[in-house]
Image (spheres, helix red, strand yellow):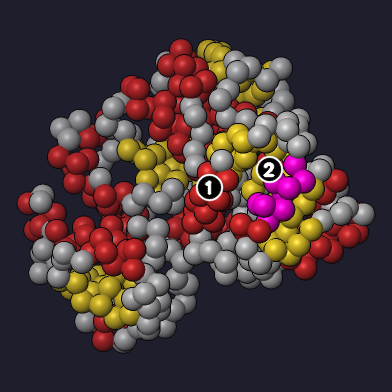
Amino acid sequence: MSSDLTRLFSGLNVTVMGLGLHGGGTAAALFFIKNGATVTVTDLQSREELASSLQHLSPYPVRYTLGGHKEEDFRNADIVIKNPAIPAASPFLALAERVETDISIFLSLIRSPVIAITGSKGKSTVSSAIHHVLSAVYPDARLGGNITVSPLTFVDELLQNPRQAEVPVVLELSSWQLADLKESRALKPAIAVITNILPDHQNRYPSMESYVQDKKQIYKNQDPCSKTVLNFDDPYHADFAKETPAQPIFFSRGPLPAGLEGGWLSRDIGRVRLGKSESVVFGRELKVPGEHNRLNSLCAGVVLTAFGIAPHMIRQGLETFPGIAHRLEFVAEAGGISYFNDSAATIPHATIEALHSFTSPVHLIMGGTDKEIDFSVFQGPADIPKGIYILEGDAAEKIISVCTAAGVRFKGPFPSLDSAVKAARNEAHPGDIILLSPGCASFGMFKNEFQRGDEFTRIVRSMI
């Protein structure tokens, strides 16, 4: 236990609002317990639904209010730690004296240089690729945030590191996490990154513009000595470049206009130009498949170059980066059929990118929960898969409508992922690919996209 942290938090009443299943609520509760606070956890879900998270807290003295919230848990709290999934307009939060998040607490404590990444898609891959390369130069470099690792799990180690001010922290931040930082000036990244902007979470936001406004929070507190890395091919990049207080740097599929610094793809090779220096950050061979992952790698290469990592270290790291779970993750090959888990593809644009990543025939499993996103973008690419297998869920009707308009055959809706995988396997031939890339959220059939991906992996391996 850090004595400095104990002095800050010992004796305080802390309410964790939203324990959840991704680890953020658990990490927050453990952090405050270990630093002397009295902790209450409150969640709308039941004890049974939260069993996996509650197991981690079972050895510790925690007070619980589950299946609902009580006003006194908020009125009596010195600090309320808010889960990002909880709307800021919750009337219970209005009762609290002080509302924070695991991210805001972490940022208020550390002196490390922060590389913060957001975007509609690609942010987990970019964050992980950056951390993969940084770890070879800074073995103590840390990765956390929306990637299901709360930074409170490693804040003690960081604070006790005598080189803390040099050790980089990579934070993947969702629009919800950024929204929770609006009233704080704690987020001042040395490098901020926006991978792209695509329609997402429109079931949560009143408009696309309000979603974009939350993304902008990533650069609001930067200064002219910091850098903002932007996607030159994205229509929003011009507004971001004008608004950021930092130096804008770009990445693009094609050559950048004269005078702009950043990276571009040249015959599949990643090149970066900053100042008078130009370097190759990766060659034609990458372990992660797909054109979109080549662009993700380029974005990471630009960030790493801007952070001062030597070009040969960047190239070596990016060319050996294995990718991450649930994002075009190779699961297995059986009977000549290859299985890929792309469960993190929760919008149709991501599914389209996944389809373009393969040259072999693809049997696509998709469907799930509708986030009030327009699926018409899928009408053209709907004829790419050899077969489409639709999962039950409130997005099924939209997908069926698009497939029908495109004149494309489909099967389903299937009541389970298991039945969809088996149907795809029965129609696939050696050399084909079976791809889970849902284009939708997972709620209803699964707790989250990670459980969905894990279940796909389990089903595939059980058939081998």
In which quadrant of the rendered view does residue 66 lie?
bottom left
The 10 Å Cα crowd at callout 2, few under 14, some 14 to 19, many 20 or more, is many
Tag of residue 462: 1
Q: Residue at x 68, y 56 (%)?
A: 420
> Is residue 52 rendered to the left or right of residue 410?
left
Residue 92 or 85: which is nearer the viewer? Answer: 85
Whole-angstrom CA distance, mark 1 to mark 2, is 15 Å
Residue situated in front as seen by the camera: 235 or 150? 150
Left or right placement of residue 298 versus residue 41 in this view: right
Say if 432 sits above or below 262 in the image: below
Occupied quadrant, residue 440 = bottom right
Relative to 304, does residue 454 appear above or below in the rendering?
Answer: below
Tell me if I can see residue 426 in this picture: yes
Q: Amino acid at mark 2?
A: Ile
Magenta stretch: includes residue 458 = no
Mark whose residue sits in front, 1 or 2: 1
Query: SS for tag 1?
Result: helix
